[in-house]
Image (cartoon, rainbow, N blue to C red):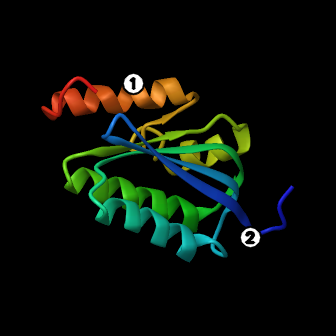
């Protein structure tokens, strides 16, 4: 278990030339927020429109971390894309439910569902079959 306030890792990969997957591990709180915000902004400024955040290994998220994700979703949408979040831990999922952001952020339990949600959005936006 990571010490409080430690984002253990952010791994990134691009799939099929259109989808960027960011895998987070550890805790997403005010201590790591600036670093995470910088990484997300760099991905979006690099031209990404479709972003899938894998939080399956995230143990904790606070309101600051949640704010970063809402901001990332808004920026992706402004670029003609969207964001989805994979989350299966009940305590982390509860943050999205309580805040009312579960639907806004396309929070789903599996990577497959996240990718399907973004592929459907991409087709609606005229971006191809995915």
118 up-or-down from 57: above or below: above
Q: Mark 1 or 2 closer to N-term?
A: 2
Considering depth in this image, is 23 or 63 the residue closer to the camera?
A: 23
52 left or right of 86?
left
Q: Quadrant of residue 75?
A: bottom left
Name the mark on residue 40.
none
Callout 1 secondary element:
helix
Percent x, y for residue 70?
42, 57
At which x and y percent is residue 104?
38, 43
Q: CA distance from mark 1 to mark 2?
A: 32 Å
Q: Position of residue 124 (x, y in %)?
A: 17, 29
If the image is split into quadrants, where does the N terminus sit? bottom right
Compared with 127, 63 (above or below) is below
From the viewer's side, name the closer residue of 58 and 43: 43
- Seen in the image, is 84 located left or right of residue 18? right
Q: Find residue 78 and report its horizontal and vertical position in percent.
A: 21, 56
- In the picture shown, does residue 36 fall above or below 79? below
Which of the 4 image quadrants contains residue 93?
top right
Residue position for label 1: 116
Q: Please name the residue that numbered disc 2 is placed on.
A: 5
Q: Secondary structure at mark 2?
A: loop
Residue drawn at (36%, 53%), measured in percent from left and top?
Answer: 73
Above or below residue 85? Residue 130 is above
Residue contact between numbered discs 1 and 2, judged by CB atoms under 8 Å: no
Q: Label 1: how many residues lie within 10 Å, few (<14), some (14-19) or many (20+)? A: some
């Amino acid at each position: 278990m990571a010490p409080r306030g430690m984002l253990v890792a952010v791994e990134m990969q691009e799939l099929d030339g259109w989808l960027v997957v960011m895998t987070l591990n550890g805790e997403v709180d005010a201590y790591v927020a600036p670093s995470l915000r910088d990484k997300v902004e760099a991905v979006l400024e690099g031209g990404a429109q479709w972003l899938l955040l894998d939080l399956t290994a995230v143990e904790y998220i606070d309101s600051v971390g949640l704010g970063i994700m809402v901001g990332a979703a808004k920026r992706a949408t402004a670029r003609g894309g969207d964001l989805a979040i994979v989350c299966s831990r009940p305590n982390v999922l509860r943050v999205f439910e309580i805040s009312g952001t579960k639907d806004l952020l396309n929070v789903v339990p599996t990577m497959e569902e996240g990718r399907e949600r973004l592929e459907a959005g991409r087709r609606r936006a005229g971006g191809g079959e995915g």
